[in-house]
Amino acid sequence: MINQLNIRQLSEEREESLSSYAVKSRLSRGRLKDEEPCPIRTTFQRDRDRIIHSKAFRRLKHKTQVFIAPLGDHYVTRLTHTLEVSQIARTIARALNLNEDLTEAIALGHDLGHTPFGHVGEEVLNELYYRGFRHNEQSLRVVDLLENAGKGLNLTWEVRDGILNHSKSRSDVLGKGWGQVNTLEGEIVKIADIVAYINHDIGDAIRAGLITEDDLPGSSTKTLGHSHSKRINTLVSDIIESSWAVRGEAKIAEKPTINMSPQILEATNILHEFLFERVYNVSLARAEVEKARRVIRFLYDYLKKHQEKLPLEYLTGSDDSEQRVVDYIAGMTDQYALRLAEELR
């Protein structure tokens, strides 16, 4: 009966009213393995659901964003960060008449490969593993190889591309190290990630007593606003206005991009640099961070020598014994890593 209702086809027909620059689900480049289409959901809706129901997504709730082992209940976790990115990205995508389902799927999956203990865990694994470690590449491994008992989630090319290419270097927002995603929906997630973490990291830093609202650069807050909600509203509104050509309502010579106005971009970069100088680098000197480094190093060295301690699902993910260890450690929550290190000592 469901097949006769043509529910998915009706959704695909509604997508025809999207911008000419939007990715239509029926025109997806497809999956790694062919599948029968869902009678109810479009391909991107199906990807979103697979990500939400994955074990890696559930574990995000116990993974650190910036502050390790905070005592308060209101610090951002990797899961709440992901949800904020999704909300901001969907708002922008809807305003620009792009594919909101694709945008949401990329946003929900973009950090699945993040390590325990936030960027500290990523740095340590990058130091230890001879091939290096980057969380965006690990996120792709999660959805391609590690989830679903080693079968992966078999996501579409567009979602996988957005997950792989969302990462940025420390350089200026939209600067040389910005990189490129192959869909505008992916570009939205990339910029929404910045909007989310700049603002919630300010809140967490104030909560931790590292800074006060008055410490924020005046040249930046004068432009962006003096509160969390005002800054997000300013940034989102500016991105939408600066990217309005993406809607495809006027003919232009080149493909439009997701952008910011020069004034807002400058203020954002000032705030971005301030966080590195006053929050990220300062917080990295705390005792909890050094403990996290020791835990990651111990687990890496121990598990390299004792492969029999790896769960079965990680033994089939690679022929490289060190890659298996990396896969296992990267998938751990903060508390699980601490607990396992205690058990193995």
Image (cartoon, rainbow, N blue to C red):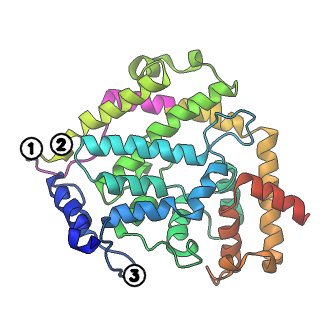
Compute the Cα span from label 2 to label 3. Answer: 35 Å
Tell me whether the residue at label 1 lies in contact with that at label 3, contact meaning CB atoms closer than 8 angstroms.
no
Q: Nearer the viewer, mark 1 or mark 3?
A: 3
Q: Which amino acid does label 3 sit on?
A: Lys
In the orientation shown, which residue stands out farthest toward the right?
Answer: 345
Residue at 36% across, 80% down:
35
Amino acid type indicated by mark 2? Ala
The mark closer to the camera, 2 or 3, is 3
**Quadrant location of the C terminus in the rendered image:** bottom right
Label 3 Cα crowd, 10 Å radius (few <14 / some 14-19 / many 20+): few
Q: Name the side, left or right, on which 179 lies relative to 211.
A: left
User: In the rendering, which numbered label is found on residue 245?
Assistant: 2
Query: Looking at the image, do the residues carrying marks 1 and 2 touch, with CB atoms under 8 Å apart?
Result: yes
In the image, 313: left or right of 12? right
Would you call the spot at circle 2 few (<14 residues within 10 Å), some (14-19), or many (20 or more)?
some
Give the CA separation, mark 1 to mark 2: 7 Å
Q: Does the magenta stretch include residue 310?
A: no
Residue stretch rendered in magenta on the structure: 251-271
What residue is pinned by disc 3? 33
| Residue sitting nearer the eye, 235 or 63 | 63
* Residue drawn at 58 percent across, 28 percent down: 203
> For the residue marked with disc 1, what is the amino acid?
Ala
* Quadrant of the image occupied by residue 183: bottom left
Q: Picture coordinates of residue 72 (x, y %)?
A: 71, 32
Based on the displayed image, in which of its 4 quarters is residue 206 positioned? top right
Per the image, the residue denoted by label 1 is 250
Give the CA separation, mark 1 to mark 3.
Answer: 38 Å
Of the two numbered discs 1 and 3 on the same chain, state the one appearing first in sequence. 3
